Image: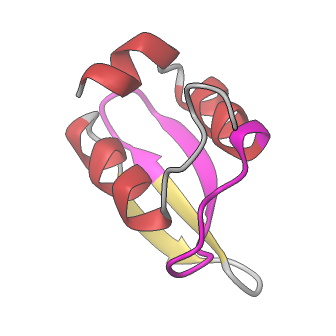
């Protein structure tokens, strides 16, 4: 059993990031991708684990870098 952010896949996270104005910028090393919000001039790194779930701590770090509140993320 995990927390509120447990169980999100790469696809679900990136769809929600798109809803917040982020878009894919470039491929990083290995399975890492850079995402960018031009309006807010914010960058974040997203791990593409395919169909596997992102770890809750990883997702929290992504949201912190993006300036997105956990509750807002869960609602969109």
* 44 on left or right of 40: right
The correct choice, above or below, for 75 with respect to 39 in the image is above
* 48 on left or right of 15: right
> Which residue is painted at 36% across and 44% down in the image?
17
- Which of the two residues, 30 or 4, is positioned nearer the viewer here? 4
> Which residue is painted at 60% across and 47% down in the image?
44
Q: Residue furthest front?
A: 1
- Which of the two residues, 4 or 23, is positioned nearer the viewer here? 4
> Which residue is painted at 56% across and 44% down in the image?
43
Q: Is residue 7 magenta?
A: no
Q: Residue 58 lies in what quarter of the image?
A: top right
Q: Residue 6 lies in what quarter of the image?
A: top right
The correct choice, above or below, for 63 with respect to 8 in the image is above
- Which of the two residues, 60 or 39, is positioned nearer the viewer here? 60
On-image quarter of the C terminus = top left
Residue 45 at what x, y percent from top left? Answer: 65, 55
- Which of the two residues, 16 or 42, is positioned nearer the viewer here? 16
Residue 71 at what x, y percent from top left? Answer: 42, 12
Q: Residue furthest bottom?
A: 30
What segment carries the magenta color? 36-57
Residue 46 at what x, y percent from top left? Answer: 60, 59
Q: How is the image coloured?
A: secondary structure
> Which residue is painted at 56% across and 25% down in the image?
4
* 54 on left or right of 21: right
Q: How many numbered badges does the structure rendering display?
A: 0
* 27 on left or right of 8: right
């Amino acid at each position: 059993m995990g927390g509120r952010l447990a169980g999100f896949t790469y696809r679900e996270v990136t769809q929600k990031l798109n809803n917040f104005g982020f878009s894919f910028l470039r491929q990083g090393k290995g399975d890492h991708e850079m995402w960018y919000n031009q309006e807010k001039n914010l960058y974040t790194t997203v791990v593409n684990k395919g169909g596997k779930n992102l770890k809750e701590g990883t997702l929290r770090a992504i949201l912190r870098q993006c300036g997105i509140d956990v509750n807002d993320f869960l609602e969109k």
